[in-house]
Amino acid sequence: MAEPARAKPKPTPETQHFWDGTKAGELRLQRCDACANIYFPPRPFCPSCASRKVSVFKASGKGKLYSYVINHRPAAPGFTPPYAIAVVELDEGPRMMSNIIDCPQTPEALELDMPLEVAFEALDDKITLPLFRPAKG
Amino acid sequence: MRRNQVAVVGAAETTELGVIPNMSQIQLHADAALNAIADAGLKLSDIDGFATAVETPQQMAHYLGITPTWVDGTSVGGCSFMLHVRHAAAAIEAGLCKTVLITHAESGKSMIGKQPRFTAPDSLNGQFEAPFGVYGPPSMFPIPVLRYMKTHGITHEQLAMVAVVQREWAAKNPRATMKDPITVADVLNSRMIAYPFRLLQCCLVTDGGGALILTSADRAKDFPRKPVYILGTGESVETPMVSQMKTFDSSRAFKVAGPLAFKEAGITHKDVDHLMIYDAFAHLPLYGLGDLGFMPHEETGKFIADGNTRPGGKLPLNTNGGGLSYMHSGMYGMYALQESVRQMRGIAPAQVPNAKISVCHGVGGMFAASGTIIFTNER
């Protein structure tokens, strides 16, 4: 029997650009053309001023560790505990949930506000997840 | 909404709490409803307004055999019942119905007749949270707490004291699931669930339910029990995605609901004799004390660690033992409301002497939603 896989996102028309971006190695955010608000998760209007004039742009992929838990039990399918579930604050402002790779999953190694950079992990030929690793230099 | 125009005239929990392997979830609703009906001295046919969560109003109305003219199926997580109380009070005042029944029950432990949780892969949660390993409330609810601790200078020992103090209250309550005393060391040595939280900082998982009956304050005097009046109410929602809260050092939904209720009640924090803050996990009482304006967030951990909320303390908090030690079937808000009503009736197992005002604050769907009800026994 196959190992249970991690939950896989299924894009909608409003989020497809984001998942196309991660597949192409880009972290894409949206900016309101009317009020300049940068927001996440994706939607075709600005949640701050309700303008429908919004643009997709490539984010820097840099951020910092805002908060996290190290999950021991119960573990989600496809994960080996203990593993950190992190919230990353992107340099552009929005926050997103992710995992921290190339880093021990311990309170000592995972310091709040540590600089992070995006890394991409393909789940299959359609979906690539944005993960984060400690920033180099 | 005007103060003290609506009252709780019936309140009861399921006959049993804890592990109830001989009842399905809808029967637990019915058990709680029938107990509340008996408590109020009513018949089910007297009920013309009905509210419930998780189970649909149509499901439960049919099962109970009632035909309501006002229905509320607001289902925003564990504080849904605070919202039901608020909506019911407004409906009664508006003349939409006269006698409202609110039911909650979950077969949270035995899982009999309870639908499993499911996150659709094309929902926002399914796309932007589930792939990163969140799996049930223990892996989600505590995600903000490390940031809260860093911003406000809260220690692990202070968060352990939340569980210690609530166990002191539970020891006074014969219906509490966990009654044996615990120490900070016991908490900090208990099994790790999701760092920084350990087993004793996470809520119980039990079966049970509760029901409330509300009517106008003018009618309430004719009921067998001492009426408990609705003095103030508040509600809000923020986001179903814990990662997308506006900030982690505070809850926006708390900061809307709590102050709304205080303003409506026309009271100050010094007037509060008894306080319930929904404690699915140990950080919630700290968020509640801060966001409801009792004190700056920086002081919340020390306030609890210094014993101010324990039996005999100046602000009795979670006097049934809370979700950490009393019971927690998944949506705990109903049990917090039940304890506030018991305190206002003067019949709580750990009764706060001469308590006249009780604040009952709920949270739902992680920090997705919030509802606050302020009760009084004086009109």
Image: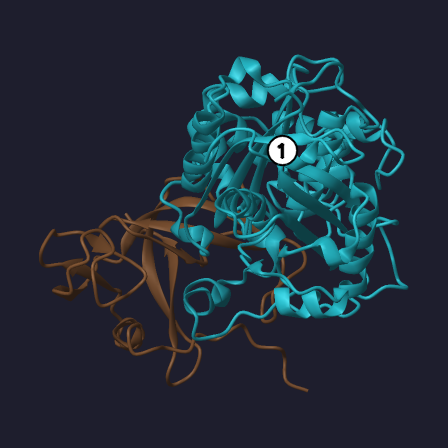
Tag 1: amino acid: Asp
In this rendering, does residue B20 appear at all?
A: yes
Query: Where residue B57 sits: x, y (%)?
Result: 62, 64
Task: Judge by depth and name the residue closer to the eye, A65 or A37.
Answer: A37
Q: Residue at x 43, y 70 (%)?
A: B123
Q: How is the image coloured?
A: by chain
Res B188 → quadrant = top right
User: Can residue A108 be seen in this snapshot?
Assistant: no
Of the pair B43 and B242, the residue shown nearer to us: B43
The percent coordinates of residue B138 (x first, y second) are: 62, 51
Give above or below for B234 relative to A115: above
Give the quarter of the figure containing the C terminus of chain B: top right
* SS under mark 1: helix
Total labels drawn: 1
Which chain corresponds to the colour cyan? Answer: B
- In the rendered image, which residue does mark 1 sit on? B218
Would residue B193 be found to the left or right of residue A66 on screen? Answer: right
Residue B180, placed above or below residue A107:
above
Residue B137 vs B110, above or below: the answer is: above
Question: Hey, which quadrant is residue B285 in on the image?
Answer: top right
**What letter labels the chain drawn in brown?**
A
Describe residue A21's horizontal placement relative to residue B173 as left or right: left
Quarter holding the N terminus of chain B is top left
The one nearer the camera, A103 or B264, is B264
Residue placed at 49% from the left, 48% from the top? B369
Image location of residue A7, percent across then percent down: 52, 73
Categorize mark 1 by other alpha carbons within 10 Å: few (<14), some (14-19), many (20+): few
Residue ID at (75%, 69%): B63
| Above or below: residue B60 compared with residue B268 | below
Q: Is residue A105 left or right of residue B27?
A: left
